[in-house]
Image (cartoon, helix red, strand yellow):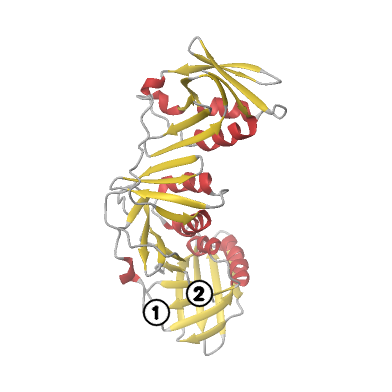
């Protein structure tokens, strides 16, 4: 292999690919990126067996070839070069020579024949979705997934279609996040993407602008955008019928400015206990909404929050962290908190935009 290509494009591709390399003692080649030079193109591949990615970079290829080298070593080397505009790659004696204007480096190669094949999904049915909508949907809910693998369907993100919307949902059984995004497409079966794959999917596509092609099979989902092809394993399971958890009626409602609630909860966090417990005291009759936090080692804090209140009085406890997590998904200035009595979940919705719904289970006293 012998080629020359743009350092900027190579760095961008390697930085995306090397994060998807894996650590496997029985298959050490997973820690590598595969470099395949062919027909005026350098294809960069990596996989951790759950995720796989291929990125094509234009190159002047003098000799075709293929090699596998450590992704972290190559990535660190290229990112430390602030001078060169072009990079030369050349294989010699089963190693990779990396040449620039300022250095010459030899990186040990591994047997490229051991590198797993990244599945190419059939393209019979293609779903085109704006990259920003895909990223927004995943970002809005993924933090609500379970981090435990005991129930795989809870440690995943549900994507499905519903009445001209694409719906993203995640839950760990203590809280649930749902984001509906306007999107006109034919109905498709629900798919479950493993929670641990979401950060890498977001990192790969967060900076792209345009339509992403989605291909779905029974065991895989693939995303393709220009020179990037990424595939992920999907969970074989049934997501809980979460709609049964969403209350239809409420006994108490609070409309509050997001900024006011965020600031009060930040202060409450200083005084909350090891369980992050905060207590909501709500009295529409007295026009009072107070948030209280107590820690026997630190002290006690009570904050009154300006809000529009209606309905019944209620005192109820929540995990402060669970509430704070959802604010990253709310872009409006106001939100509404809805309650249906003790031991029943609180529902948070943005106002006036109602695409995002967040449900939080209360804590015991």
Picture residue at 33% right of the left edge, 66% below the top? 242
Q: Is residue 136 above or below residue 284?
A: above
Residue nearest the viewer, comparing 295 with 324 = 324
- Pointer 2: what residue? 280
- Label 2 sits on a secondary structure element that is strand
Picture residue at 55% right of the left edge, 61% below the top? 328
Query: Answer yes or no: do the residues labelled 2 and 1 have beta carbons within 8 Å?
Result: no
Q: Quadrant of the C terminus?
A: bottom left
Q: Position of residue 325 (x, y in %)?
A: 51, 60
Quadrant for residue 31, please give it: top left
Disc number at residue 340? 1
For disc 1, the neighbor class at 10 Å (few under 14, some 14 to 19, many from 20) is some
Q: Position of residue 83 (x, y in %)?
A: 72, 27
Picture residue at 61% right of the left edge, 27% below the top? 5
Q: In the image, 265: left or right of 38?
A: right
Q: Position of residue 162 (x, y in %)?
A: 36, 67
Instruction: Judge depth for marks 2 and 1 and give the one in front.
Output: 1
Q: Position of residue 228 (x, y in %)?
A: 49, 40
Quadrant for residue 24, please give it: top left
Residue nearest the viewer, comparing 306 with 37 = 37
């Amino acid at each position: 292999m012998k080629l020359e290509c743009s350092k900027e494009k190579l760095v961008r591709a390697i930085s995306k690919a090397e994060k998807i390399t894996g650590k496997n003692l029985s298959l050490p080649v997973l820690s590598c990126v595969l470099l395949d030079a062919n027909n005026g193109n350098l294809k960069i591949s990596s996989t951790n067996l759950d995720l796989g990615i291929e990125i094509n970079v234009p190159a002047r290829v003098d000799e075709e070839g293929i090699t596998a080298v450590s992704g972290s070593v190559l990535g660190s080397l290229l990112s430390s070069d602030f001078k060169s505009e072009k990079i030369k790659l050349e294989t010699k004696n089963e190693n990779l020579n990396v040449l620039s204007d300022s250095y010459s480096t030899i990186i040990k190669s591994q047997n490229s024949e051991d590198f797993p094949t990244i599945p190419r999904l059939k393209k019979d049915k293609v779903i085109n979705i704006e990259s920003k909508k895909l990223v927004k949907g995943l970002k809005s809910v993924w933090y609500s997934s379970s981090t435990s693998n005991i129930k795989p369907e809870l440690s995943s993100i549900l994507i499905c279609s519903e009445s001209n919307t694409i719906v993203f949902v995640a839950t760990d059984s203590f809280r649930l996040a749902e984001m509906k995004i306007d999107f006109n497409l034919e109905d498709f079966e629900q798919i479950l993407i493993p929670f641990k794959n979401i950060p890498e999917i977001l990192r790969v596509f967060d900076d792209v602008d345009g339509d992403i092609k989605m291909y779905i099979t029974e065991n895989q989902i693939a995303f393709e955008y220009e020179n990037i092809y990424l595939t992920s394993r999907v969970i074989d399971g049934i997501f809980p019928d979460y709609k049964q958890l969403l209350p239809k009626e409420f006994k108490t409602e609070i409309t509050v400015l997001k900024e006011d609630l965020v600031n009060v909860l930040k202060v409450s966090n200083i005084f909350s206990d090891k369980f992050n417990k905060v207590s909501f005291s709500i009295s529409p009759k007295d026009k009072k909404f107070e948030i209280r936090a107590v820690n026997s080692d630190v002290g006690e804090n009570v904050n009154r929050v300006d809000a529009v209140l209606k309905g019944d009085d209620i005192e109820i406890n929540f995990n402060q962290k669970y509430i704070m997590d959802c604010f990253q998904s709310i872009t409006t200035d106001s939100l509404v908190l809805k309650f249906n009595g003790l031991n029943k979940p609180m529902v948070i919705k943005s106002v006036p935009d109602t695409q995002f719904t967040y449900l939080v289970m209360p804590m015991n006293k």
